[in-house]
Amino acid sequence: MTRVSKRDQIVEAADDLFYRQGFDHTSFADIAGVVRISRGNFYHHFKTKDDILDAVIAARLANTRAMLADWQVQGDSPAARVGAFIDILLTNRDKIERHGCPVGTLATELAKLNHGAQADAAAIFTLFRTWLRRQFDQMGQGARADDLALHLLARSQGIATLMTAYRDPDFLCRERDALHDWLDGLAPPPPHH
Amino acid sequence: MTRVSKRDQIVEAADDLFYRQGFDHTSFADIAGVVRISRGNFYHHFKTKDDILDAVIAARLANTRAMLADWQVQGDSPAARVGAFIDILLTNRDKIERHGCPVGTLATELAKLNHGAQADAAAIFTLFRTWLRRQFDQMGQGARADDLALHLLARSQGIATLMTAYRDPDFLCRERDALHDWLDGLAPPPPHH
DNA sequence: GCAGAAATAGGACAATTGTCCTAGTGACTG
DNA sequence: CAGTCACTAGGACAATTGTCCTATTTCTGC
């Protein structure tokens, strides 16, 4: 009758709570309250809290991979796809204003905790980086593609951070427009001889 | 004999630990271990942990104010001063790679904790924002000055976040150069008639 | 319907948390 | 010298933490 396994329910609830409250500040009791499971019963599904974190990161990696694969076949052009990426900031505005970017805040928190899973969390960044690099590559940016990908990632992260600090809708719109202008103004690929 | 009061020692130690480990993950025991004070004795200096946070934020506000006042009288021109601001990312590279930007990470953490002091933490951002706005204003940017200040803040925050995630020195240098180019390329003030 | 496996509840456990109290020290003031 | 005050040590306190154990229930394959 349960469409998803209890294990997946735990991962899903933990994913959400880790995003909204942070990993360290989320307790077994918090997750148990959402999944409606006995607190001591976690041990049957996950040996430690770190195991839950590993599962959450694995789930985020899988979800992000699937999302990017979807994006890859949508949009008329690579430039349009990058434009859609930029607009996530608008789409997820409320959540970002309250909890920041899920990717960036987890990587930063794990860095502060000196947690071994920090590299795994950074791998989520790399998924976006690789996807963006491919778009820029298809736009003919060649060797610059990876630099442009990192640049756009950094711009997005910075906007997300200030969105969380200030919650200023005008700022978001200005920066979104600036990113679109930047994208439009990228040097076109060298013409054929 | 003690040059600084015990209270200031507590604030200083808490400031450092909040930066390196995060506010929530830092305990009274951690601070007591640094200041060499009895754990239960905190109550004499601070009623609650939130009071320590308030004191830390107040100290950061005061320190930042003093630092910016120093910067205001250094550097040949407003543009040179903004250039120096950009180069903090290089100066504090090691710390940023390990713990992120002190301003951004605290604001983000307090947002996630739904902590009442989040607005106070954002006020540290505003100090930089106002200082940068003045520089851009003196550069003749007029009405754009505040937008430029927020833009530069966001760029810096994004670079700091990716520095923490990747620790890639080449990325830092590229972005630093890009920011200097952006600064140099700002439209000059309209000439006198 | 039954044996075995999977899942669950409930709680024990030591450790740690923030908070708060009391007793006592030492220095300065009258 | 008596008295006040800032400061401190040590620990009590209930609550919460992650972890782990042991019954008991629920489900599954035969």
Image (cartoon, coloured by chain):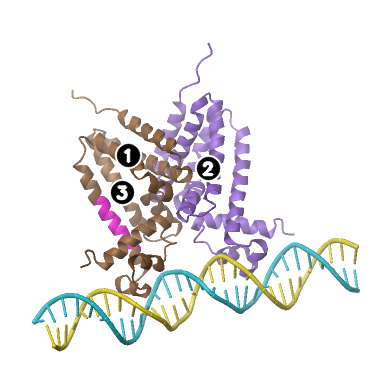
Chain colours: A brown, B purple, C yellow, D cyan
- Can residue B13 be seen here? The reply is no
| Total tally of numbered discs in the picture | 3
Q: Position of residue B88 (x, y in %)?
A: 51, 41
Q: Nearer the viewer, residue D12 or B91?
A: D12
Question: Label 3 sits on what residue type?
Answer: Thr
Spatial distance from mark 1 to mark 3, Cα to Cα? 19 Å
Q: Residue at x 51, y 49 (%)?
A: B102
- Asked if the magenta segment contains residue A30, the reply would be no
Stretch in magenta: A53-65
Select label 2 or label 3 by which is in front.
Answer: 2
What element does badge 3 sit on? helix
Residue bearing mark 3 = A126
Whether B157 is drawn above or below A36: the answer is above
- Establish whether labels 1 and 3 are both on one chain: yes
Question: Label 1 sits on what residue type?
Answer: Asp
Whether A98 is drawn above or below A45: the answer is above
- Mainly helix, strand or loop, the magenta region? helix
Q: Nearer the viewer, residue B174 or B46?
A: B46
Spatial distance from mark 2 to mark 3, Cα to Cα? 28 Å
Q: Position of residue A187 (x, y in %)?
A: 29, 28
Q: Tag on residue B125?
A: 2
